[in-house]
Amino acid sequence: MDWIDKQLLRLKDKIKAQSLRKTMSLYIFIAIIAVIIFYILTIAFCKSWKGLVYTKYSIDINSYVPIEALVKLEPIDKVILYGARIIRVYSIVIYSIIAIIITSNLFYKNKIKAPIEILKEEAKYISRNDLSFSCIYNSGDELGEICEAFDSMRLQLIKNNENIWSLMEGQRQLNSAFAHDIRTPLTVMQGYTDLLVKYYPQGKITEEKLLQTLNLMQSQLTRLKQFSEKMKDIQDIDAIKIRQKLYDFKLLKKKIQEIINGINIKSNIQINIFNNLKESKGYLDESVVLQVIDNLLSNAISFAESNIDIILEWEDDFLYIYVRDDGTGFSKKELYSALKPYYSIRKGMDGHFGLGLSICKVLCEKHGGKLTLNNSTKGGAIICASFFAIVDKK
């Protein structure tokens, strides 16, 4: 019995994995066979009853029966013969109707009911903005694929909600941090202004002290201007559209060298470019890639001791750009928080980061890649920027 149960279970799973069209065809085929078998059995049954009646009156069932012989039959025998004829004529219709009802019910119960119930339940949960219900139906048919698509949609909605909440939280923290950082120079300027208002009319401030105070106020104004420009940069980055075009990778090293030549670097820093790109052409947005490289180089130059390496690599339709310096590297806190805008704003221009890394992260993600931070095994920081860029095989 165990073997039979196992085989039946395997057959059931095999049928369950079939498409709706194939399953319906199988059900119809079985129903037709069943109708034919029952109809043949019914004909045989009716014929046997007819034979019993004819035998009672010594009538040959295979020969012609005159009307006079049938008139002599008893009423009960006439009813039996009439009933047998009616059953024989209409049984095929009755069996067909029954087969249709049974087949449709079985098809609905075995192939449609369960996934429909799951989809209805999933729709109820989604309508309540509850994405905790998993729309899973293990079947290889079309409804199984629909359930799988619904579950993928649910997971994507969860991901989208998380991204929205992350963006909202990031914006909230960004605004909070910006307000915090802008408050400091404003407080300093307020103090200097109060000092001038109180003591300058009394002649207690010398010209030298006045110029010194004005210079300090000017530095705070410059700081405020830098903050506002950085905030504008973030808003502009969000509006950037990626426009990938066929690009010759041979130009990339040349463009990077132009960036290096244009950056005001310390005279003792050596910048090396290692081009490991085997592919010749691919689709990417040059301006976005170069902007990321520019920001990463600016960051690396600020903390390198004497050497910076730029490594270009390609793998699985992704362009990887590594920028490695020989500075102190990232602390544990910096590895976790350096890509957050609010963290970098609080560090400002004098800290380890500006908004450059946060901007690079956004640009990489817009280009289908990502930005990762690590410490090199040789010491110093290493930042990897990746960009999705399909290679031209021609």
Image (tube, rainbow, N blue to C red):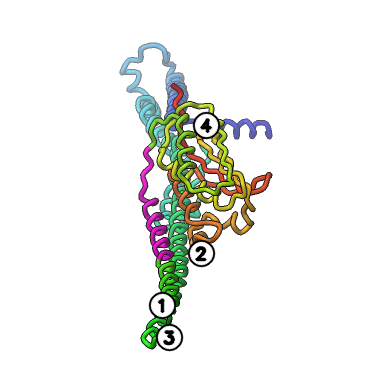
SS label for mark 2? helix
Mark positioned earlier in the residue sequence (1 or 2)? 1
Outermost residue toward the top in this view: 63
**Mark 1 → mark 4, Cα distance in angstroms:** 96 Å
Is 325 in the magenta? no
Of 64 and 239, which appears nearest the observer?
Answer: 239
The amino acid pointed to by label 3 is: Lys
Disc ID at residue 15: 4
Check contact, mark 1 vs mark 4: CB within 8 A: no
Q: Which residue is mark 3?
A: 204
SS label for mark 3? loop
Query: Residue sitting at 42 percent across and 32 percent down?
Result: 283
**Mark 3 → mark 4, Cα distance in angstroms:** 98 Å
Residue 49 visible within the image: no
Outermost residue toward the left in this view: 67
SS label for mark 4? helix
The amino acid pointed to by label 1 is: Glu
The x, y position of residue 51, in whole percent, is 45, 20
The amino acid pointed to by label 2 is: Arg
Q: Which residue is mark 2?
A: 346
**Mark 3 → mark 1, Cα distance in angstroms:** 10 Å
Q: Which residue is mark 1?
A: 207
> Is the residue 346 above or below the residue 264 in the image?
below
